[in-house]
Amino acid sequence: MARWRVGVDSGGTFTDVCLFDEEAGRVEVWKVSSTPDDPSRGIAQGVEEGMRRVAPEAGDQPGAPVAYFGHGTTVATNALIQHKGVRTGLVTTDGFRDLLEIGRQKRPDLYDMQADKPPTLVSRDLRFEVPERVRYTGEIETPLDEERVRAAARALKQAGVKAVAVSFLYGFIRPEHERRAVEIIREEHPDAFISAGHEIAPEFREYERLSTVVLNAYLGPVMRSYIERLTPRLRDLGMTTTPHLTQSNGGVIGFSMAAEMPVRTILSGPSTGVVGAQAIGALSGFPDLITFDMGGTSTDVALLQGGSCKLASEATVHGYPIKAPMLDIHTVGAGGGSIAYIDAGGLLKVGPRSCGADPGPVCYAKGNTEPATTDANVVLQTLNPEYLLGGRMPVRQDLARAAIAKLADRLGLGVMETAQGILSVVTANMARAIRVISVQRGHDPRDYTLMAFGGAGPLHAARLARELDMRRVLVPRNPGILCAMGLLLTDLRADFAATRLMAASADSVPDVAAAFDDLTARAESWFAHEGIAPENRRLTRTADLRYTGQNYELAVPLPNGPVTAATIEALSAGFAEEHRQRYGFVAEEEPIQIVTLRLEATGLVRKAELRSHPMAGPDASGAITGQRQVWFPEAGDFVSTPIYDREGLKPGNTFAGPAVVEQMDATTVVPPGMTARVDSYLNLILEDA
């Protein structure tokens, strides 16, 4: 029986399944509607249906042939967006009870009286202060008052909290007080989910650390409950392999660690799309990419320079600061389910509100009456006006047209102009997101290839590329499930960090070396816990540096080998180059400061292999399945357009727009003036003629 590697990406609209045959190198894909009420149900359904298609010989145990299972999820993200975490308490240093609400004064909307702050996740009556103080030097100034901790734990238990966050002022330097507080709380409230600052975010900046620890506690029971539901579902399918879950940093971890650190899975789904893009771009000869992942609810973009995406050590997700390693991905609320409406000023807007999977766009005929981006594409017939998912999901174009007609009447426009207007607004939103990660950081989008994936990415990619003057678009073989495929192209990974404020000078060599020795010991312990063989262990060192007095840092790779004075010199030189790239100048006379040392631990695992195919010549006519009238704004009318079946396209095939390429998991639009060719890895490459 063949052995299969399975990757599943559970999104807000669809659950995508990618299956890779280890022996034959065959890739199969499957897609089912998500089940927002219980995502584990949709995942189990997708795995069962997908495996029954490729391994019918497994009978009533379709999960038995699965040798590896990786999973990306939006459970933590959705719980945060919808504020459906658990009742949470906080124990913190005396005098810092209100830090969670005070935050920082450095806010773009500081003087905006209409700005809405996200709800505070711990109400003030559930925040308890206890006497304790560790100085920044690590010296204990005030011992921990254990009785106050015990009293706080009892009060929180009586208040019915299900999770407790513990974060003391300098707990990341000397964690004894936090450890003891956790022990006491566990004695008094054994059923509580407890998160401690020195374990979740052992770095400086007290507000960001506190926010991260609170988020982890708030989401912990939700993630644990989800994993407890999913695990037996997979077991019932006959699956015996150890399941893994994606982190925001693009790597995967075991379910047990994910249950303890859900804050590290906030960008679980989008991160593996970037990993997949990285692998495919390298094979196809396009190392400099801007990824464009458009799904049903949102669009995620990232910049890959030289084949790699930068890691961010801190980000703000839906208004909440998170201090955890994550790929530098920017998200906007623009997806196939984004709802179009007219604002108070009479202008057409799209998103960020989404119709989700249930009821979905109007054309799904599940009760929604507000038109979404997908409805506009169905009306313009860039999407199949009769069905999606290769015929498995019928759609109602008449309902979509009627919903858009209501908007058109209010705008004084025709139905087609309004539908095209919806797409133009969405394109502008996505272009703005790409400028954030490129132009605003010193990168010219014209120097990059746009890699489009997600269920809706290839549908909009050509228009977006033209909006940004980008000349090339790369659409992978299975764009709609690339995030699921990315799960089969990534490794096990964990990140460790230690804040050590010191000058970037030769005098700091012993302290830097000692800190990395400690981080390495922690990484080795993690390797052992995950059962990673010594020959499959990899360590990568970086350091966050800044000019003394600067507010924020830049990450710089640390050279291999023992830490010496030459290592520090190389760090300083790397920082200067990074500063010039980001800000356009170097302050040569300013002293440089080392802030946080980081260690990335990678456990290599067997990955799916993407294989090259022999060229079959330029003639693509054999893949044409028919013609369809498609609205193109260049013509201002419908144009008779050939429809290509992606399955029928062979390496070397070329054709010119206008054209539409259909496949089960996505649709690619090639507008007039663009050409398309298929490379040896079956990627579709669009270029302006």
Image: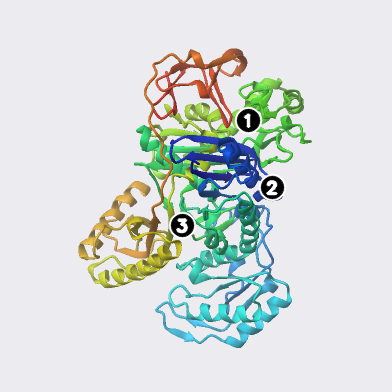
Rendering coords of residue 114 (x, y %): 67, 52
* Residue 497: mark in rendering: none
Disc 2 or 3, which lies upstream in sequence? Answer: 2
Q: CA distance from mark 3 to mark 1?
A: 35 Å
Residue at point 61%, 51% (across, down): 234
What crowding class fits label 1: few (fewer than 14 Cα within 10 Å), some (14-19), or many (20 or more)?
some
Residue under pointer 1: 389
Q: In this view of the protein, which residue sits in the foreground, 233 or 380?
A: 233
Q: CA distance from mark 2 to mark 3?
A: 27 Å
Disc 3 or 1, which lies upstream in sequence? Answer: 3
Residue kind at label 3, given as amino acid type: Pro
Is the residue 431 above or below the residue 95 in the image?
above
Residue kind at label 2, given as amino acid type: Pro
Is the residue 497 above or below the residue 631 in the image?
below
> Residue 447's quadrant in the figure?
top left
Q: In this view of the protein, which residue sits in the foreground, 442 or 313?
A: 313
Local SS, label 1: helix
Rendering coords of residue 667 (x, y %): 57, 27
Disc 2 or 1, which lies upstream in sequence? Answer: 2
Residue kind at label 1, given as amino acid type: Leu
Rendering coords of residue 62 (x, y %): 60, 44
Residue under pointer 2: 36
Q: In this view of the protein, which residue sits in the foreground, 612 or 101?
A: 612
Q: CA distance from mark 2 to mark 1?
A: 19 Å
**Tags 2 and 3 touching, CB below 8 Å:** no
What crowding class fits label 2: few (fewer than 14 Cα within 10 Å), some (14-19), or many (20 or more)?
many
Residue under pointer 3: 325
